[in-house]
Each structure stands twice: as structure tokens, then as C-alpha cells.
Image: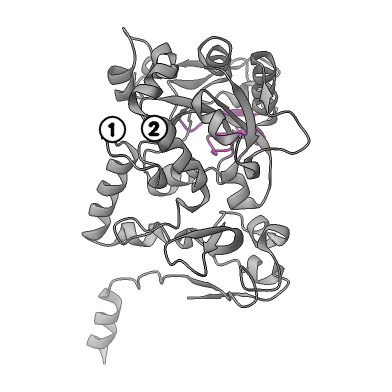
Amino acid sequence: MCKWCFTHGTNGEKWYMNAKNYSDELADEMNLKDYLEEQWLNFEQVYIRKIMGMSSKDLGYKMKMPIIGRVLRKIAENMIHSEKKNRKGIRADGHFGQVIPLEDGKVILSELAAEPIICNYCMCRFMQRGEKEAVCINFGQLSEVIEKLPRFIPKDRAVRIDRETAMKKLEENNKKGYIASVWFQPVPYINAICSCESPECGGFTLRNNFNLDVLYKAEYIIDLDQDKCQGCKSCVSTCQLNALRYIPSMNRVIVDYDKCFGCGVCRHACKHDALKLIPREEYPGYDGTY
Amino acid sequence: MGSKVKTKMLKKPAKKKKTKIHIDSALCGADGKIDPRDCAKCLKACDPAVFIMHPALDLKFKDKYDPQRWTISPQWGSLCTRCLKCVEVCPENAITVKW
């Protein structure tokens, strides 16, 4: 249970399992359509736009500056987790997410996600690698906004998809090696499931390099059965976060639990059923390390 | 003589210098010959994904971005490993890396 589960979940459930966070009423109540329109019209500028006279260009150097760095980190964290009323879409206030395993993603898409569901291009990947790939699944009021913006929509395909296709698409991406993640946009309205890749995703870059909590680790962690592992190394190549390593002397794989996000992608590669996801609080010493 | 050597050894190791990546906007980008959206070779060559492609500032308004004109800028300069692959791969030789 991360801190967002206590504020936005219901009776001990995870925040993304709360049906209220997906409802149209919530979006109407907070008047989020304007926010989303503003955010997605200016989506590609969020990194370069100056906020309080500072852009996130060379953020690594700016964060290392003695006092300014600490102030900057605080401002950035407040912006990412902002729950205020005057949030601006242009700065993507209150837009953060969490890694989820495939099972949870399927539950969201089959039961919780609001209609209509669309599949659009991942803009992170286009901005950082120049590749247009339709892997992001959006739902609710956000999809009505994105439908009107042609640069996010694949030309040769119907944009709106049904729940079955969305689930199939997510599974396909997950088995390919992409990491499923669910996003607040803004807190507490949930309207996107992405299939992310480690250095390209905006969330992963900020989390892994600058330790900003844009993307939280999953509620789960990987558990390796040492007796079942045969040392075939096939899981090592699927881990995007360098959490798995092969040790020749023991002829098995070891896990770096500090790096593991609990996405569960490595399970698809294991032929011997040695990898299993367990709740994060059950693994000793890793309770609360989101 | 000896004391000088000692003080040198006691000094702190030199700070790692900032990597300065510069992309010539006359050769690549909104005002250049090629559209970065068609090329994007540096984006693909860079392993830590330092570069970012984004809309350029509008010519008329100072605060607005034009979605038709795109440029590339080195956003996460601190991640640069100085491998100079981007310099090699650029068809217009627009990138310079200094440190």
C-alpha cells in the first residue's frame, strides 16, 4: 500500500482498483476536460517549457547544485503530486503513475476503465527515439480529447477499440517486453494504461536518473525460486531495468531487489516457472519501497 | 619541492566537467534543411536517450510553440557518456560535443 492507496483507495484496496477514480462524474466535478485539452495540445513541450524561470533542460546538473538543487527538487515534487484546484495542464501538474503487472492491467481494462477506449501513439517514444508506436491505451474523457488531435492517432486503423482488443493489445505488448503502467492524469482521475520502455519513457527517465517519483514501483516484487531456476538466462534479456543478472558459478539468476519495479515481464520468458510475483510488503525489508 | 607535491596529492579530485552539447539550428531543426522528424538519427544512436525532439518556438509569438516546426535539443545532458556516436551519425554535422 503506497501513500496514494490510503488517500484514493477504498477499504484497503489499491488506488487503481477504486472504481470511483475512473468515473465520468469525478471528471465533470473537477472540470478536467479543460485541463486535459490544455495538456494534450501542449504535450510535447512539457520538458522544454520554462516553469518559474527554469526549464528541465540539464536537470541532472541543476539538481546537483548545492541549495538550488534541493529547492528545485521540492518544487518539482510538489508539481508532480499536486492536488490543488488551480492545476495547469500545460505543466502536467498531478500527472504520475505506477507500474502494474499484466493481471492488474487486465482487471482495469475489463471492469474499471470508462468508455470510450482508444489506442494512440506513445509520445514519449516519439520525442526520445523518433518512433511512432501505438501502445498507449487511454479511456474516459481523455480519449475524447485525443481523438481530435491527429498527430496522436494512427492513420490506417480505427481509433476506438473494445475491451477485448485492448486487453489483447496490452498482453501482446507485455509479452514483447514493454512494462505496463497506469497513470493519474491528474490526481485522482485515472485515464491511461501505457506500455513503457525504460530509457525512453518520461517517467522512467525521471525516476531512475533523478529519483523523482513520477513513476512508482508496483505493489509487487519478483520472487525467484532458486531450486527451479536452471540458468537458461532468457529472463535476463527481458528485464529493462537491469534487475536480473546471471551468475556462472552458481548457474542461476540473481535478482537486484532495489532495481526491481515488479512489472512481471520476466515471467513470460521463464520456461521453468521459477519467477513469481509476490506482494511487496511480504518480501522482508522491501515493505514501503515504492 | 617536496611540499608542493604533497599539496597536489591532498587536493580533491577534479570535478567532472559539464558536457556541453550544441546543435546548430542553421543546419538541423526548424530553420534548417532537414526536418528532424524524418531524420532522427541521433535520437536512435544515443543509448542513454539524451536528445529530445520537440516543437520549436513560433516565429511571431515568443511564448508559443508551433506544432509544425520541430527541433532537437540535448535535454538530459548529464546522462551523456561522451561516446560521440551522435556526432558520427549526423548527416549535416550539426552536433558538437565539448567538455
Q: Are marks 2 and 1 on the same chain?
A: yes
Task: Establish if A288 lies above or below A200.
Answer: above
Which of the 4 quarters of the picture holds residue A161?
A: top right
Q: Chain of mark 2?
A: A
> Label 2: few (<14), some or many (≥20) within 10 Å?
many
| For marks 2 and 1 on the same chain, the one whose residue lies earlier in the sequence | 1
Front residue (pair A100, A184): A184
The answer to whether residue A117 of the structure is visible from this angle is yes
Residue A199 screen position, x and y as percent: 55, 46
Instruction: Say which quadrant the N terminus of chain A sits in.
Output: top left
Residue positioned 43% across, 16% down in the render: A23
Q: Secondary structure at mark 1?
A: loop
Q: Spatial distance from mark 2 to mark 1, Cα to Cα?
A: 8 Å
| Residue linked to disc 2 | A186
Scheme of image coloration = one colour
Q: Which residues are magenta?
A: A235-257
Dots 2, 1 in contact, CB < 8 A? yes
Q: Is residue A97 magenta?
A: no
Front residue (pair B24, B68): B68
| Residue linked to disc 1 | A83
Q: Which numbered dot is residue A74?
A: none
